[in-house]
Amino acid sequence: MKKIILVGYMGVGKTTIAKLLSQKTGFKVVDTDALIEKQTELSISDIFKQKGEIHFRKLEHEVFKQLIEDKEELIISTGGGTPCYAHNHLFLNGDQVVSVYLYASIDTLFQRLKNENSERPLVAGQSEEELKEFIAKNLFDRSYFYNQATHKVMIDAKTPQEITEEILGLLH
Ligand code: S3P
């Protein structure tokens, strides 16, 4: 196995878990959003504002494909929408690839996103009521793609350390 890919909705903690997994496995960690920001020298919010979501999805696909094709052992922390566009879900079970869908209840996602949505263009500026409805609908639309992951791990009421241990148990 050369690539561990973490997928899941905004706010499930992909970046945090990827860092912990990196410490445990020694694999380098790469975050697709961080790489896009570095390459474009723009924040994700500014890319959405200045160039639009479709442009962002193209960049996201290119970056994700490059990482999958990289020869190095990597932990790839994706953006919440990565597996849901441009056939990216087809990469989730490739040769030497293991993917993990980190999933949570709508209520957990709502609690996490309501306090930290300003940096996330898809949910920025929504009222609490709008946010809850958006999460429910969007998660429903995206579930098919997330469920293509090799493994699924529920994150509700678990610490990042517990989630990391659970993932490590699945990798053997
Ligand atoms: C998005 C999630 C974000 C980021 C962009 C779009 C999405 O990443 O890629 O704002 O479509 O769910 P996080 O899941 O890290 O917030």
Image (cartoon, rainbow, N blue to C red):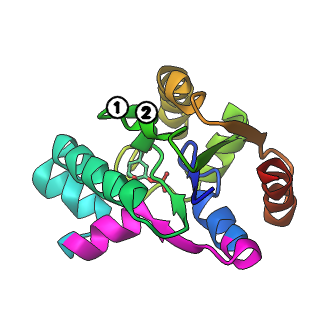
- In this rendering, is residue 84 above or below 27? above
Q: Position of residue 125 (x, y in %)?
A: 38, 48
Ligand 1 neighbours mark 2 (CB distance < 8 Å):
no
Residue 119 visible to the viewer: no
Ligand 1 neighbours mark 1 (CB distance < 8 Å):
no
Of residues 48 and 131, the one drawn nearer to the viewer in this rendering: 48
Of residues 30 and 108, the one drawn nearer to the viewer in this rendering: 30
The reply to whether the C-beta atoms of the residues labelled 1 and 2 are less than 8 Å apart is yes
The answer to whether residue 32 is left or right of residue 150 is left
Q: Which residue is mark 1?
A: 87
Dividing the image into 4 quarters, which one contains the N terminus?
bottom right
Residue 161 visible to the viewer: yes
Q: Position of residue 50 (x, y in %)?
A: 12, 57
Q: Which residue is mark 2?
A: 90
Amino acid type, residue under disc 1 in the picture: His
Instruction: Write the start and end of the magenta stretch as one range.
Output: 22-39
Q: Is residue 166 magenta?
A: no
Q: CA distance from mark 1 to mark 2?
A: 6 Å
Q: Position of residue 150 (x, y in %)?
A: 65, 36
